[in-house]
Image: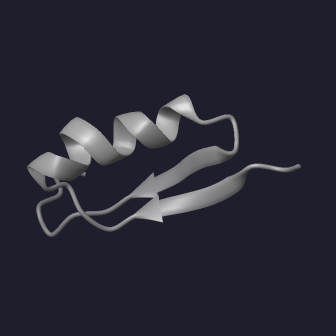
Amino acid sequence: MKPVRWGVLSTAKIGRDRVIPAMQQSPLCDIHAIASRDATKA
């Protein structure tokens, strides 16, 4: 199976601390982009 490429549209604390790290652990997830209203957080 090919990994699913994801774009994350949030840099909220729960995303940074829980969701994104969990996605990075999966061989079927590829975080392709991250966006935020604040460019310094993206």
Horizontally, residue 40 falls left or right of residue 4, namely left
Observer able to see residue 6 = yes
Tally of numbered discs? 0
User: What residue is shown at x 20% (from left), y 55% (from top)?
Assistant: 11
| Extreme-top residue of the structure | 25
| Extreme-right residue of the structure | 1
User: What residue is shown at x 36% (from left), y 43% (from top)?
Assistant: 20
Tell me where residue 17 appears, x and y as whole percent: 20, 37
Horizontally, residue 9 falls left or right of residue 7, namely left
Given residues 40 and 28, the one toward you in this image is 28
19 in relation to 6, above or below = above
Observer able to see residue 41 = no
Tell me where residue 41 appears, x and y as whole percent: 16, 48
User: What residue is shown at x 62% (from left), y 46% (from top)?
Assistant: 29
User: What residue is shown at x 26% (from left), y 40% (from top)?
Assistant: 18
33 in relation to 21, above or below = below
Horizontally, residue 2 falls left or right of residue 27, namely right
Given residues 27 and 38, the one toward you in this image is 27
Tell me where residue 34 appears, x and y as whole percent: 37, 56
8 in relation to 41, above or below = below
Given residues 3 and 33, the one toward you in this image is 3
